[in-house]
Image: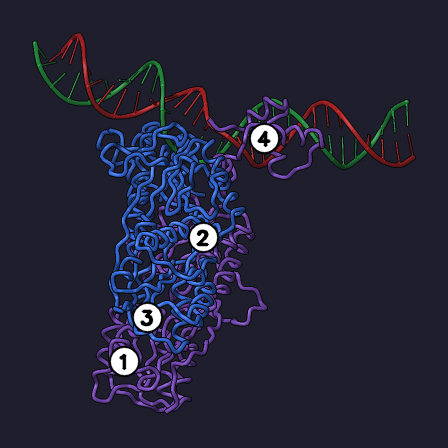
Chain colours: A purple, B blue, C green, D red
Amino acid sequence: MAATIKDIKELTGLSLATISKYLNGGNLRPENRAKIEKAISELHYEVNEMARGLVTSRSKVIGVVVFDIANVFTCTLLKYLGENFRRAGYAPMICDSQNDPELETENVRFLLSKKVDGMIVIPAGQTAAFLQPARNAGIPLVLMDRSLKGSGIDCVKVNNTASSYQAVEKLYDYGHRRIAIIGSDLEITGKERLDGYLKLLEEKKISVPPQYIKLGHHSIEHGYKSMQELLKLEEPPTAVFMGNFEIILGAVMALNESPFECPSDVSLIGFDDLIISNLSNPRLTLVVQPLRELADSAAELLLKKLEKGESQDNGKNGFSGEESSAELPEGERILPARIVEGESIARV
Amino acid sequence: MAATIKDIKELTGLSLATISKYLNGGNLRPENRAKIEKAISELHYEVNEMARGLVTSRSKVIGVVVFDIANVFTCTLLKYLGENFRRAGYAPMICDSQNDPELETENVRFLLSKKVDGMIVIPAGQTAAFLQPARNAGIPLVLMDRSLKGSGIDCVKVNNTASSYQAVEKLYDYGHRRIAIIGSDLEITGKERLDGYLKLLEEKKISVPPQYIKLGHHSIEHGYKSMQELLKLEEPPTAVFMGNFEIILGAVMALNESPFECPSDVSLIGFDDLIISNLSNPRLTLVVQPLRELADSAAELLLKKLEKGESQDNGKNGFSGEESSAELPEGERILPARIVEGESIARV
DNA sequence: TGAACAAAGCGAAACGTTTCGCTTTTGCGG
DNA sequence: CCGCAAAAGCGAAACGTTTCGCTTTGTTCA
């Protein structure tokens, strides 16, 4: 059906090798170049990437495995990643793990059978076992957002602990001492953010009742219920730190339905997602992740490895000397999050 | 590097043909089956889909071209589409057009060179020209959300006009007569929603000042500015219909910053996106698109075509007789949106 | 003018599968 | 135990490229 290089051969009288050379940017005599171009446009010829891939054993496809595709965090990242890869001549093939480690494992196998040249992974699970087939295949790998401890796989992420420390510190600086957290200890990102909260409490020698520490899933329900419970306490917190987007959503919802007002009764600071702050009244003060930089950095790192033909398992981690964060065991690139001011924090 | 079928041949002593038969589910003697399975797991063999695709000329990849990937509407759809395709043994390859018709054109070419078996397209532009190469290639095509008039390409979408009619009717039923719209006439979806609004006004014989009709881009800015302007009018509207997610975002933001209150001063109803209504106070009443059904329906339609080996240009449009919406020129599947009640509409 | 060298073009093999048509093996009934 | 049909297995060609090593053509300078 579709035209092939052989059809061009017929039309031009040139050899396959010459036409291939043209397709891959070699030198040709102008007249031959013209002949080929004419034939290509007449035949609507398009390179068959499957045939090309078979012989070059490079597919120019990058597998992207995300823990959950249907959220703003992920799809914004996907957008930026896509831009980067396209610019470099690669296409992303995106697989959604739906927060299911089994599906995640299958996704990796699947992409491998598609012979992707490399992978970007935002893991759903906590162990690196599911990536073993990819490591065996020797293709470069870059994690995003969540590192897998001890795996030795490079990761580009945000300094969760330091950023949440800063967030809570801001509450502290505004005079708050009864500070609660709604967060998670079920996955890495949540744990790291919890650590920041605990660290500040410890350093400032604040102690809070255990009911102030609400841990559960990163879900709207958890945020909603936890906020309700916090507000029901005899001595409710004067400020709440919310660990991610879904939690913010649920918590703000609960607060809106309660007689409490923000910030006069309760001050709020949240982690993640700029856009929602526009909707809430008053505007939320947030810790926002630099998504653009996160994606650019991860893409750059993977492309660099691809270029070098560097495989995942050959020891070195792709960071050159000038990288500030030296000495990190897995080769982590850690970017700072920034605080975006709203009006959701009151002085006490 | 990676194991091939030939390695299995060595290990088992069987022929390539037999091994291929195994891989494709043919009948083998149990002992041979066992041999092959042993070899496969020893060698970590994975089928090379490029080689397979070259000979079968089917890639088992479906191209998905979206006008913009970084929004909840699109990525929710992607999630559901992905589930459907994976279940049927296909993988989606997603391209983001970034609202740029040129990039959209390039995306189609790109996917074609990857030899995708079919395409799902949520178009950025308004004409079907960019799809011509795909039609020439004879692969099945399904549009989503936005039909391309006169193109003859099937489309799965929501009944925008009827739904926005209903939305505005609800305002009318609550006694509102000074009803404004913040929407768009720059693309199909927006136009159709505008039509619903205008239709109700006409049928109920209401006339509104032209300043009540705010048309522009589907952007936060447009929503924000328009709401500001509406509120500044000598006779501001008592109710506002907001045409999509970004507009809602901007409009609610402007309202929150103003002295006006919802719903006592201004009633609101919006089109799209359930999740945001949880954040706003009071909760918004919304017209919500059935994203799951939209995706399921589009996937089913495309898979059916794929199965039939039906190409886009062979006349019939893939709808069987039992489909309710007969006689639609381009083969449209139109699904109803539903109204989700909030507390953002007051009686006047 | 011709030697020497660079540039351009060529033929054939290779990539890892599937598939076609044929041969061999198996199992069954008589 | 034989014969036969059905089942299983086989070899080779094909898919559409790239690439290697070689040959031809063109160019330059003595």
Tags 1 and 4 both on a single chain: yes
Q: For the residue marked with disc 3, what is the amino acid?
A: Ser
Tags 1 and 3 both on a single chain: no
How far apart are labels 1 and 3 at the CA level?
26 Å
Q: Which residue is mark 3?
A: B280
Residue at 52 percent of width and 71 percent of height: A326
Residue at 25 percent of width and 34 percent of height: B33
Query: Looking at the rendered structure, which numbered label has been put on residue A213?
Result: 1
Q: Nearer the viewer, mark 3 or mark 4?
A: 3
Label 1 chain ID? A
Q: Which residue is mark 2?
A: B185
Q: For the residue marked with disc 4, what is the amino acid?
A: Ile
How far apart are labels 1 and 2 at the CA level?
49 Å
Q: Nearer the viewer, mark 1 or mark 4?
A: 4
Percent of width and height locating residue C8: 70, 31
Residue at 45 percent of width and 33 percent of height: B135
Q: Nearer the viewer, mark 1 or mark 2?
A: 2
Q: For the residue marked with disc 2, what is the amino acid?
A: Asp
Disc 1 element:
strand
